[in-house]
Image (cartoon, rainbow, N blue to C red):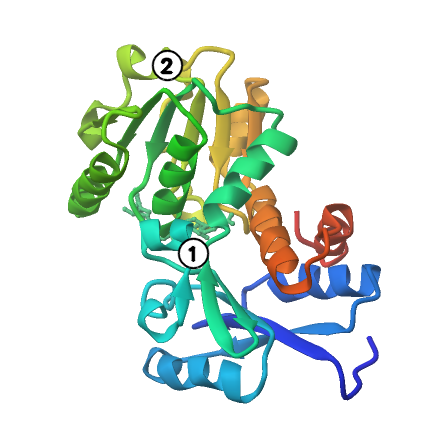
Amino acid sequence: MKINAKTKIVGLFGYPIHHSFSPIFHNAAFAGLELDFIYLPFSVKPADLKEAVQAIKSLNITGINVTIPHKEKILPYLDEISPEAKMIKAVNTVHNKKGKLIGYNTDGEGFIQSLRKEGKFNPEGKSVFMVGAGGAAYAISFALIRAGVKKFTFTNRIFDFERARVLFKHLKNTFKDRCELSLIDFDKRNSRQILGKVDLFVNATSVGMHSSDDQLLIDLDFFSPDVFIYDVVYNRKTNLLREAEERKLSSLGGLEMLLYQGALSFEIWTHRKAPIETMREALKQGGVG
Ligand code: NAD
């Protein structure tokens, strides 16, 4: 990587960020296409977010990815918000377009693209069951309904079931009757009646990120053999994915969503098609996946 006076800077705002894989695959993509860009990690504490966003302009930074805990808090500091980001009230990508900061959210579309391209699964007309009601669940539920799923059922653990109620209301208000929408109690999830006709199951919770707390949130016995299992957790192979593979169910892990959301950010900043294979290979070389 040769840095010169014209090198364009992009990067990541988050706190903490030392675990992020994004610098690995973005820098590999820039090198692969010989683009004069560099991707840097910026550890931005919550109290410094406003100043950090102002610095995107003052330092002429081309673009930024945004991660926990800034995805929602950044909205008021941006000049324009894309329709997708506005809908879910969260931004994961900022583009500095001639001094104007535009916020996007590529998580949902990254999920859909990975599902279609790597999973060969077309969500149109399908029945989905999701566990989760956090940031990932918001992005995924909106994207799946926009992509035309017929039936969308979800739940969340009792401890923060209120988040699921809020998401349900938000989905209902946005999509009206465009999709058959249900929110069910967490302890009613494991039943053949609910899971038997599901085409796609999504774990959109953080369960599985740590080996010490990698419980199975769903009983795979209740699904049909044609079900597709998607786990958004990307830092390790979860028990859910292991079990799905053992049962020869089609499945995908969160690393693919991570790659595709990153590819979409890359395309926003560079106006070039992202080299997904180069990016995936960089993660493998870095010992990820
Ligand atoms: P969040 O904190 O906003 O939400 C966490 C969700 O997990 C909530 O629904 C919470 O109720 C649930 N949860 C947490 N602990 C639980 C437990 N013990 N039992 C049952 N449910 C539990 O987090 P988020 O931003 O939505 O992230 C969730 C996961 O998605 C994380 O693993 C994150 O790394 C991953 N993620 C992946 C991508 C990707 O590109 N692959 C993108 C965004 C997030």
Question: Residue 212 or 165: which is nearer the viewer?
Answer: 165
Across and down, in percent, residue 114 comes to 59, 37
Nearer the observer: mark 1 or 2; the answer is 1
Residue ID at (36%, 82%): 50
Location of residue 39 by image quarter: bottom right
Where does the N terminus fall, quadrant-wise? bottom right
Name above or below for residue 63 compared with residue 220: below
Task: Name the side, left or right, on which 227 lies relative to 194.
Answer: right
Q: Is residue 56 visible?
A: yes
Looking at the rendered structure, which numbered label has been put on residue 112? none
Q: Amino acid at mark 1?
A: Ser
Residue ID at (56%, 28%): 251
Q: Amino acid at mark 2?
A: Phe
Question: Residue 247 or 40: which is nearer the viewer?
Answer: 40
Q: Is residue 205 visible?
A: no
Q: How many numbered marks are there?
A: 2
Across and down, in percent, residue 196 comes to 36, 11
Q: Secondary structure at mark 1?
A: loop
Across and down, in percent, residue 135 comes to 35, 51
Name above or below for residue 245 compared with residue 167: above
Residue ID at (76%, 83%): 6
Distance of mark 1 from mark 2, alpha carbons? Answer: 39 Å
Residue tagged by mark 2?
Answer: 222
Mark 1 neighbour density, 10 Å: few (under 14) some (14–19) many (20 or more): few
Name above or below for residue 82 compared with residue 10: above
Location of residue 46 by image quarter: bottom left
Across and down, in percent, residue 242 comes to 55, 31
Mark 2 neighbour density, 10 Å: few (under 14) some (14–19) many (20 or more): some
Q: Secondary structure at mark 2?
A: helix
Residue tagged by mark 1?
Answer: 82
